Image (tube, helix red, strand yellow):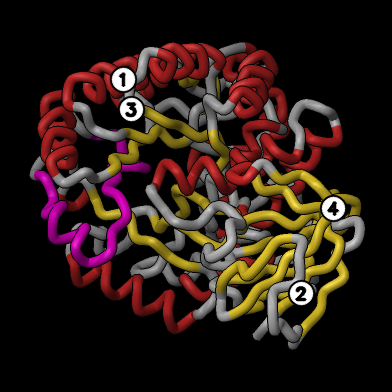
């Protein structure tokens, strides 16, 4: 279809566009910005007045649960939730059953995504066999099958020596390595941030050093091996400062924080609601503010931290529940809150959600250049909606925002120029 998107506020950091203009899509690609292309006849015209038009969002690390945990979610359910939230590309984390450490599992995920036909799904191959942190995976074969990167996340059980060898191996194939910065030994059996709330609730705490020690290790190894490294789920102010310094010094390291970490703090855990049981844990207001500043400065990108669970996983006492939030569908609203609070502008928001992740992953997406694949998101920044069964698409209902009113809602999502979601 030929699509004419009229008079939207177009935000495209790659081309330094932040203005009200028109976007024309033809043959699955951006045909023109502003001026009507020759011989263009629109099959569909969308009035985007008072709406934001931007590149589709890209999530660097998403748990899709399939294969193996279909009782929690499926590729079809979560990719549908993704496009309803403006995400056009998802990177599937390797903690599937079986683990995504073979070409067979990678191909299965690619095929399942093609059948679902919503968002693009890019598998993340396991860094080590079975994510056990011991034998290295067949990274070259995984890359050949379509794995965009290799990852040990969400596992952290890997020795510095094995990690160094893995990064050397990945670097030889120019493969991005995605890690969760958390020292398993320091974390121990911790559940929440070590501080006032952990003492008050009688829960074992996770100190800041569990993250900063792991970040320091990743920076040192990235510098030594010249491997491209991305750290997912930064949660501490000290972590942001360490990454800013490393990036300034030219280390090939990028990072993201989860959108809900930009809104919530350790104080929210005080109700013992298991929907606040997340990993890494919610930290202090000081850390939350540092994460916001890190996003604004470009040190951090933003991912959803999406981990859908079945209801039983969150019904037990806090200490026995599984960590994680179903968060694809609340990410945009979390970011819009920061824009409306003047902590970010639209340019910075789209860099964090689209242009930045695309650059990290080496993707052609993430911009609206003429000739680029038309992965486009249109959203109303002022629309309000309630997080409830009528509005929710993910199979995971585990969100601390259930029943709350959110601001900002996607109206249209295009993948490869195809309208995959319309509200």
Mark 1 secondary-structure assignment: helix
Mark 2 secondary-structure assignment: strand
Instruction: Tell me how far mark 3 sits from mark 2, CA to CA.
Output: 39 Å
Q: Which residue is mark 1?
A: 219
Disc 4 + disc 1, Cβ < 8 Å: no
Residue depth check, mark 2 versus mark 1: number of the one nearer the observer: 2
Left or right for 402, reference 197? right
Q: Is residue 210 above or below residue 418?
A: above
Residue 94 x, y percent position in the rendering: 32, 54
Q: Earlier in the sequence, mark 4 or mark 1?
A: 4
On the question of residue 281 being in view, the answer is: yes
Left or right for 31, reference 145? right
Q: Residue at x 52, y 40 (%)?
A: 356
Residue 170 x, y percent position in the rendering: 17, 42
Mark 3 secondary-structure assignment: loop
Residue range corresponding to the magenta coloring: 136-157
Few, some or many C-alpha atoms within 10 Å of disc 4 (few <14, some 14-19, many ≥20)? some
Instruction: Quadrant for the N terminus, please.
Output: bottom right
Residue 410 x, y percent position in the rendering: 76, 62
The circle on residue 252 is: 3
Instruction: Tell me how far mark 2 sits from mark 4, CA to CA.
Output: 14 Å
Q: Which residue is mark 2?
A: 4
Residue 131 x, y percent position in the rendering: 22, 47
Q: Earlier in the sequence, mark 2 or mark 1?
A: 2
Instruction: Tell me how far mark 2 sits from mark 1, CA to CA.
Output: 45 Å
Instruction: Quadrant for the C terminus, please.
Output: bottom right
Few, some or many C-alpha atoms within 10 Å of disc 3 (few <14, some 14-19, many ≥20)? some
């Amino acid at each position: 279809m030929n699509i004419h998107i009229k008079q939207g506020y177009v935000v495209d950091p790659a081309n330094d566009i932040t203005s009200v203009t028109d976007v024309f899509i033809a043959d699955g690609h951006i045909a023109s910005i502003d001026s009507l292309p020759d011989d263009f006849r629109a099959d569909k015209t969308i009035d985007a007045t008072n709406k934001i038009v931007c590149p589709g969002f890209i999530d660097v690390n998403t748990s899709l649960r399939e294969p193996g945990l279909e009782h929690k979610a499926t590729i079809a359910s979560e990719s549908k939730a993704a496009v309803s939230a403006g995400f056009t590309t998802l990177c599937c984390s390797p903690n599937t059953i079986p683990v995504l450490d073979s070409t067979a599992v990678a191909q299965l995920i690619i095929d399942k995504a093609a059948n679902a036909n919503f968002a693009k799904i890019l598998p993340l191959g396991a860094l080590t066999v079975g994510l056990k942190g011991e034998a290295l995976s067949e990274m070259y074969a995984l890359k050949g099958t379509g794995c965009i990167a290799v990852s040990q996340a969400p596992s952290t059980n890997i020795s510095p020596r094995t990690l160094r060898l893995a990064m050397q191996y990945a670097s030889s194939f120019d493969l991005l390595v995605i890690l969760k910065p958390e020292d398993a030994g320091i974390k121990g059996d911790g559940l929440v941030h070590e501080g006032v709330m952990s003492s008050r609730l009688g829960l074992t705490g996770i100190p800041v050093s569990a993250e900063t020690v792991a970040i320091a290790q990743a920076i040192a190894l990235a510098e030594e091996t010249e491997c491209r490294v991305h750290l997912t789920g930064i949660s501490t102010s000290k972590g942001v400062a360490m990454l800013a310094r490393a990036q300034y010094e030219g280390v090939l390291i990028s990072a993201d924080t989860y959108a809900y970490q930009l809104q919530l703090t350790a104080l929210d855990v005080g109700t013992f609601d298991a929907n606040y049981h997340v990993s890494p844990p919610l930290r202090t207001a000081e850390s939350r503010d540092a994460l916001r500043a890190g996003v604004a400065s470009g040190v951090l990108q933003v991912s959803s931290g999406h981990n859908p669970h079945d209801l039983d996983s969150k019904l037990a006492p806090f200490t026995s529940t599984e960590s994680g939030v179903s968060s694809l569908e609340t990410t945009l609203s979390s970011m819009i809150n920061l824009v409306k609070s003047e902590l970010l502008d639209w340019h910075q928001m789209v860099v964090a959600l689209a242009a930045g992740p695309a650059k990290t992953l080496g993707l052609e997406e993430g911009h609206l250049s003429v000739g680029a694949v038309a992965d486009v998101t249109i959203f109303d920044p002022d629309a309000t909606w309630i997080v409830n069964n009528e509005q929710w698409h993910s199979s995971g209902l585990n969100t601390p925002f259930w029943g709350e009113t959110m601001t900002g809602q996607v109206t249209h999502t295009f993948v490869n120029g195809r309208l995959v979601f319309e509200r």
